[in-house]
Amino acid sequence: GYIFQRRIRVKEKFLDFDHLRSGRCTAQQFDRAVSQLVPILSEAEVSALLAHYAADSAAGPQMGRPQLVSYQRFTRDVDEVFAHAELEKKPTLQVPRPGTSLQSTGFRPASVDDEVRVQHILRRIALLTTTRGTILRTCFQDCERSDSTSLMCPRYGGKVTVAQFWQHFPFIRDFHDADMQLLIRRYTTDDGDIHFQALDKDVSEIETERAASSMMMPPLSARATASSKLSQPSATYDRPGTAEDLLDYLRGLVSERRLQLNGAFHDFDRLRRGLCTLNQVKSVMTVLRITLSNKDLEMLDTLFGDGNGGFFYRHFVAALLGAEPP
C-alpha cells in the first residue's frame, strides 16, 4: 500500500547495487534500499524480508557470496500491485485494475444508535439519485485518482477523507448536519476515512429493490379497463416524516411513472385559476394510484393551502417538477 500510493519505482533503488544486472545484491544493500523505499518498516520487518528473499536460489544465475539476496523476486512481488509480470506470456489473462488487491473487501458499516433513521437516510439518497440521475460513486472518484490525494487515501481504494466527503457529497443541501454526521459515523473506517464504495453499494441495493417492485406494477395506460385500474396496487408512503420527505417521495413517483400532473388537476379547474379543494387533491392522487394519509394531506395543505379550504395546485406541481411557481 505504501508503494502503490506513492507510485515508487522499486527496481530503480537496487540498480546502483547491481551493475551486472544479475538480480541479486548483498544483505546490507538490500537493507539500505528497503529502508529508503519504506522508511516506516522496523528492523524486525526488514530482517524478515531479508531472510525470505535470501532463501531464494532459483531466480537469476547462481551467485556466490556476498550477493545472496534476490531483489529481482522482491521487486516482482511488490509490482504485482500495479500489474502482473510477464503478461506477454499470458495473452488470455484477465488483468485486474491496479490497486485491486489493496481494496478492503471485509469492511462492514458500523452500527449506530438510530439505525431506523440511517435506513431512512439511505432511502432518501436512493430516491434522489434516481430522480436526479446522479451516479453516487462517480462524485468521489476524482478524490481517489488524482496525484494530490495519493498521500491521504489509497488510489482506487473506495475511500475518501471526511473533508472530501463533505465537499463532494451531491445532496449536501437536502440533509441536516445531524443526518450527515450519522452517515459519516456509519461509514467511517478504522483509519478515519469514509468508505464511499460501501455507501454506494447500500444505495444501489435499495435502488435495485425499488426498480424490481416498480416492474411488478403494471403501467397506467389509456387502454386499460376500469377493472384493471382498480386491481392495480397503490403506492403508499410508509413513513411520512417531514413535509420535505413527502415531496421527495412524490417527486420520485412523478419521475418514475412520467405522470402528467397538470392534466389531472385541470379536470377540477375549468377556469384555470390554479386553485382546487383538498378533497379534489385527494381524488387526483387516487387517480394517479398514490395513496396519501390524512397527515400527508395536512402537510400539503400547510404548504400550498390558502387557509380557506383552497389548494394552489400549480405551486404544488412546480415544487414537484423543480420549476418556478407561476
Image (cartoon, helix red, strand yellow):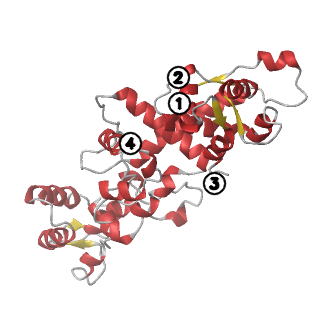
For the residue labelled by badge 4, is the local secondary structure a helix, a strand or a loop? loop
Percent x, y of residue 222:
88, 31
Neighbor class of circle 1 (other Cα within 10 Å; few <14, some 14-19, many 20+) is some
The residue that mark 4 highlights is 105
The residue that mark 1 highlights is 299
Distance from Cα at disc 2 to Cα at disc 3: 26 Å
Task: Please tell me whether residue 185 is drawn above or below residue 45 in the rendered image.
Answer: above
Residue at image coords 64%, 52%: 323
Distance from Cα at disc 4 to Cα at disc 3: 46 Å
Task: Please tell me whether residue 325 is drawn above or below residue 108 in the rendered image.
Answer: below
Closer to viewer: mark 4 or mark 2: 2
- Is residue 59 visible to the viewer in this orientation of the structure? no
4 or 2: tag closer to the N-terminus: 4
Distance from Cα at disc 4 to Cα at disc 2: 44 Å
Q: Residues at badges 2 and 1 in contact (C-beta under 8 Å)? A: yes
Which quarter of the picture shows residue 119? top left
Neighbor class of circle 2 (other Cα within 10 Å; few <14, some 14-19, many 20+) is few
For the residue labelled by badge 2, is the local secondary structure a helix, a strand or a loop? helix
Which quarter of the picture shows residue 230? top right
* Residue at the extreme front of the image, as rendered: 308
The residue that mark 2 highlights is 295
Query: What amino acid does circle 2 point to?
Result: Lys
Choose between 131 and 64: the one closer to the eye: 131
Residue at image coords 14%, 72%: 32
Choose between 298 and 18: the one closer to the eye: 298
- Is residue 235 visible to the viewer in this orientation of the structure? yes
Neighbor class of circle 4 (other Cα within 10 Å; few <14, some 14-19, many 20+) is few
Task: Please tell me whether residue 251 is drawn above or below residue 24 in the rendered image.
Answer: above
Which mark is drawn over residue 322?
none
For the residue labelled by badge 3, is the local secondary structure a helix, a strand or a loop? loop
Percent x, y of residue 118:
39, 33
